[in-house]
Amino acid sequence: MTVTTPLRGSAARPASAATPRRRRLTERRSKALAFIVLTAPMLLGLGLFRYVAIGWSFLLSFSEARRTIALGNWVGLDNYQELLADERFRDSLTMIVGFTALIVPLTFVASLALAVLVNRVRRGRSFFRTAFLLPAAVSYVAAAMIWKMALFSGVPSGLANTLGALFGADPTPWIQTQSPPLYWIVLVTLRLWLQVGLYMILFIAGLQSIPQHLYEAASLDGAGAWRTFRSITFPMLRNTSIAILLLMFIAALQAFDEFYAIFSTGASLGSEPVRTPLTHLYGVALQDQDYGVGSAGAFLLTLLIVLVTFLQGRILGFARDKD
Amino acid sequence: MSASSALSRRGFLGTSLLFVAGAAVACSSNPQGTAAAKGAKVTLTQWYHQYGEEGTQAAVKRYAEQYTKANPDVAINVVWGADTSQYETKLNAALLGADAPDIFELGDFRAEMARAGQLEPLDDVYGAAKGGFNKADLDYLTVDGTLYGIKTIDDVMVLYYRKSLLKKAGVTPPTTFAELVDTAKKLTTDGVKGLFIGNDGIGDSPYLLAWSQGVDLIDGKKVVYADAARSIGGLHQLHSDKSVLLGFTTDWYDPGAFNQGAAAMQWGGMWSLPAIEKALGDDFGVVPWPAYDSAGKPVARLGGWTQAVNAKSKHVAEAKKYLQWLWVQQTDIQIDWAVKYGFHVPPQAEVAARTPELKKGAAKDAVAIANKNGISFPAEWTQAMQASFIAAAADIAKGAAPEKALRKAQATAQSALDKQMG
């Protein structure tokens, strides 16, 4: 590198030394060119497949588009009105807010507790970390099938029913039982199993950036485990926690896969006991081919997510520096 | 910054651009395609959903190759697609794009598609053979006086029952809904449920209940299913008796639960008949869904698959000629397709009469039930109407007031129907 540069600068192109300004300009221009050429495919792809699609969908939400994605048949806010008048969609919104309020704290506590525990283990730490992270690599649909057909199937040979039989319980159709709503056990355990590992890893990364000397000082002062956690670990994890909470809120509000996979029967639609906004919109847009109303729903959901994120930002702040 | 490193950077750029271009080309070719276009002038793309029966995929390819042998100008690219639950969604998406199939299958024929101009009229494909086709099928596929599809197989769905289990419980196959409830209760013992109508405990039963009370879903331009509140309300009793099997590993359209003895009666398709015969020998029988009461009538749902031609296809004439060859003229292929893999009825009466498999035992009974009690969905029925109807029925099974739940769903369906009729 350093050997060839003076050669080119002084001997091969002596004129360039006389006009360093122009040379800098060419260099800057070629750098800009390289930047454009290198990023263009990515930006074009992103623009075409993301932003143009989002913009198109936004326009579709104001247009009557049944069995077509052509624009032009403008109907103003009719699609939004129709959707908000639809009781099934409103129910799905209420449901998802409740679901989020339940699942986010649960996932948060579970993954934080797991992170602290795994971080304290002396032997086999990486084994435990891997073991808990592995489910995050499993697809939602594959996991939902296991939950539906092996663990919580209604037949006596399902795992949950086999365990129940040891205690003399009758075989229970877990997913279909409405009162009490046992299907929530299936949905919540599935989601926890899939998600806790990933958030645990994020928490562990946060834990390891806490300076060790704080703990040493605390133990000299005679602080116990709980006190250490409350006064050092948790406050020092503030930024990590806020980022993780944000991810959790978005993941919960966008719930689709397991709700669809657990309740889909393959033949009839509509018998599922709970619907998320996305499963409802999937039916509207992709099955019933009403792309106008479907797009309107997508933007209502986006609005909800933005709102929640904004509220979280107002209450907790976005990962701002600790003062 | 050296000249050599600048060069290699440029080289890197070039290669990466080539890579991107190559990837784009690779992505645009159809990985699922089975193009046989050697010297053919026209290649037709034909979509099938994924049939579960063994040998079906090879069979449809064989039919296509046979056609190309007789008509070297036309090659058929058979695309074997998604399973029943996802097929329509994928098809609808494909029909919006440039890669749309020329010929495709439809599980439930949708008049809405014809009205939206997506389907090509097929009256001339039938020609003089029209009179030989099943009358109910023709009515089903006719929208405003024009035929838009051709049935490839007819399926009838019936109530299977285990003779030995009914005998042991001292009951006979039910002939009214009250009897069905009673029989299901008596047949429910330790480890065996009386009736299996679907993992959700709903399945197609709301349709059957309405029809068995003598109420159809749509009458002219009016959605009328709320008139069946009395019969659909019966779902609540079936559920609170705990005599229906829920959450089995396979659903009602698979004979698994019946064959394994998890249910003594199961609503299922005639396509399962060979598998049931193999598992249970002659220890089973078939009856239609019982009449709701003495004023009602026994019913059976008629299904099957329809093929249609994409109105926007560039090769409409060739596609129609191929369909005519395949589903009107080639009667041997039609018999092969109907009974050699699964078990279905060929839609042409003359062809069905020549199919020996349909003339004996339970198959004969099922064909008789199809002819006497068969009802299809109205062609105007859509997935959205189905979703709100089934959701109302599921609420009723849980204990909601039938009349109120159905009226509400019916109002939504009516506004969808009004939009469809324009």
Image: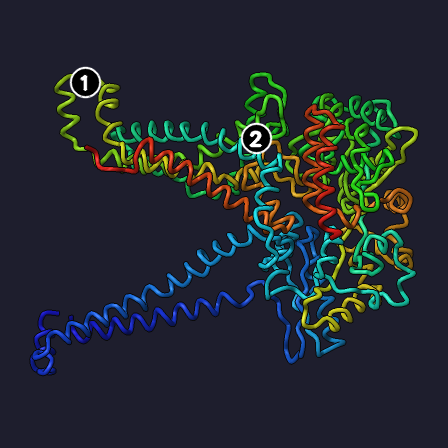
Name the residue furthest front. A76
Q: Is residue B250 above or below residue A62?
A: above
Q: Position of residue B266 (x, y in %)?
A: 77, 35
Q: Secondary structure at mark 1?
A: loop
Q: Residue at left 31%, top 66%?
A: A38
Q: CA distance from mark 1 to mark 2?
A: 44 Å
Q: Amino acid at mark 2?
A: Phe
Q: Amino acid at mark 1?
A: Ala
Instruction: Examine the image and state in which quarter residue A239 appears.
Output: top left
Marks 1 and 2, the one that precedes in the sequence: 2
Q: Position of residue B88 (x, y in %)?
A: 66, 52
**Could you say which disc has been placed on residue A152 in the image?**
2
Q: Secondary structure at mark 2?
A: loop
Q: Residue at left 23%, top 75%?
A: B7
Q: Chain of mark 2?
A: A
Residue that label 1 marks: A223
